[in-house]
Every structure is written in C-alpha cells, then in structure tokens.
Amino acid sequence: MKKLVTGFKILAVLSVFAFHSCSDESDELSRQETVQTKITTADLKKETTPISQAVPGVVQTQLDESQKSLEKYLKNDLQITGINVIGKISTEKGIELSKNLITDKDQFIASGNVTESSSVKVGRIGDLYTGDDLILAQNGLKEMAMEEIKNGTNVMEVIWTSKTGKFTTLCFYNDSGIVWDNVLGGLVIMDTRGAIEDSASGQAAARVASKWYKQWWTANWLWGSKRGEMGYQITVYYTGSTVSNTDVNDWAYISLGKAKSETKITKRTGAYGQCQYALGLCTPTGSLSFNSSKFSISFSGLGSNIVNNGVKSLYP
C-alpha cells in the first residue's frame, strides 16, 4: 500500500511538471505571437503605392516654417532633421493600420504651447498618458484619424532630434498640406494674453448710442497659419450714462481639436452692462467640459489647450 501511495505522488509531481511545461510553452508562444503581430511602418508601406520622395511645395514650406518656430521658441530642444516618404495609402487596411500606428503606446507625441516652453511635453504616448488619460488620448486620435486619413492620403516619416534622442513620427499629407502628425499637430502657438478691440478704437459714431468690447484668443499651427480661435463680444446700448440693454455673443472653433464657448448676461441695464464668459480650445488628445452651475469650462486629459473663464463689465 505504501508503494502505491508513493507511485501516486510521483505521478502527481510529473503531472504538475507537465502542466507547467505546457503552460510555459503556451506563454512563450503567446509572447512570440504578440511580437510577430506588432504593427510597424513596414506593414503600412505594403498598403501604399510608391510616390516621389519630394513632398509638395506647401508641405515643405510647412515643415520649414515649423522648424523656424521650434528654433525660435524651443531652441535646440526639438528639431526636424529629415523626412522619409513612405507612399500613398491605397487600401482600407492601410487606413486601419495608420489609425492603429498613431495611437500605439510606443509612438511619440507632443503637446503644449511652444511660446511657453515649460508647457511642452514630448515622449511616447504610453509614457505621457496613463489610465483614463491614455484612453481619452487614443480615442481622440482615432476619431481624428477616421475623419482625416483616407485612401489617397500620403504618408511619410518625420525624423526628430530632442533632448532625449532621436525618434520618428508618421506625418500624413496631401497636395494642399499636412493633414496630421502627432508632434506637428500636438503643438500649438498661442498668445495666452489674447487680443482686445473696442468701439472707441475706430468707430467714433458708435459712442453715440452703443459701445462694444471684444476679446479673443488665437491658436496657430506650428508653421504659423491660423488653427482656431475663441472669444466674446459685449455691447451696451445707452442714453446719456444709463444702459438700456446689453448683448453678448461668443465663438470657439479649432481645426483637428475640440472647442467650447458659453456666455450670459449678468447685468443688462443700469449704470453698466456685464457678461460672464467661458471659453476653451484643445487638441484631440484632451477634452473640454462645461459646468453650468459654476459657469466655467475646464480641461481634462493631456494636450495643448487654452481655457478662459471670466466676467466683463462695460460702461457707457
């Protein structure tokens, strides 16, 4: 009987050993499969047709002007050092691969306002974003890609040098210009002070019965052209020193990003007119939300953004 028990013990040990061996082998196969299915630019290239290594003139100008902006604001911290044209996307699979590649955690991305170098962040998506922020960023990029990257869109690699070393990004473009690049599209040029204009600056007649005040903020692409704007304008109508009515309007828009604007009149008549405003712009990797009880817009996630909440009073 003792020998029989010992035999069972040996059989049990062998069974456990065999189970772990199979499990280890299965894990190894799974790891190998993951490595084998890792999407690369080589896979994307198979879904493209060859095109010239010379990019359209407008695209080259955008790259050159972007480099000038980087040199002006970030010095040698981030530079474009070259490009490598991959081809023209020619299949639906190519579109899907493009979407997956630009949202991959190992791909590089940038965010921030280059006029404020301390706000600029450059790194792998998986390093800069975690948890809900990562999901928000990837979803934002996917939504943008679904709308902007189509059959016939050209794609190239942009080669970068940063403080931490060299890396590449995928840049999508067509004959009219750059469509998207995780760094070129993630960075913006913004004057956080905004611009101001009022009726007294050029319309003397407006002082007779009305007066207005306008304030706005502009976001530009890295190459300098306008990307978006947000602002408000308050107008008071008056007789003598008494305001009889107050109007306000607002606006916010941005190319390849998110925008919100809200305003309301808080004092319509009397000695002055007053409005409250809530304005926001951000790139695709972030999100804007409006709190009606606090009458304010807030930004969440990570990405280039500008938000302004405030009150403006205007006297006759």
Image (spheres, grey):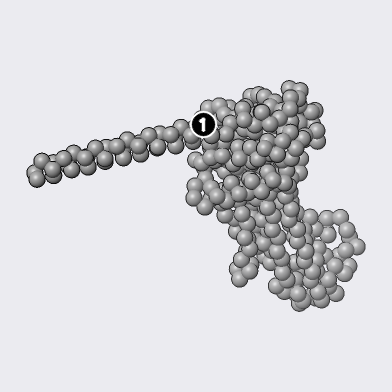
Q: Residues within 10 Å of mark 1 (few under 14, many from 20)?
A: few
Please state which of residues 53 and 167 is positioned toward the viewer in this rendering: 53
Q: Is residue 269 above or below residue 145?
A: below
Kindly identify the residue that appears in the image at 13 percent across and 43 percent down.
4
Which residue reaches farthest left?
2
Q: Residue 277, located in which quarter of the rendered image?
A: bottom right
Q: Residue 31, located in which quarter of the rendered image?
A: top left
Q: Is residue 115 visible?
A: no
> Quadrant location of the C terminus?
bottom right
Tag 1: amino acid? Gln
The x and y percentages for residue 164 are: 51, 30
Q: Is residue 166 above or below residue 97?
A: above
Q: Secondary structure at mark 1?
A: helix
Q: Is residue 139 left or right of residue 128?
A: right
Which residue lies under the disc numbered 1? 36
The x and y percentages for residue 234 are: 77, 64
Q: Is residue 241 above or below residue 99?
A: below
Please state which of residues 280 and 155 is positioned toward the viewer in this rendering: 155
Which residue reaches farthest right?
205
Kindly identify the residue that appears in the image at 59 percent across and 46 percent down.
138
The x and y percentages for residue 53 are: 73, 22
Q: Is residue 150 above or below residue 53?
A: below
The x and y percentages for residue 307 are: 64, 55
Q: Is residue 232 visible?
A: yes
Q: Is residue 195 left or right of residue 164?
A: right
> Quadrant location of the N terminus?
top left
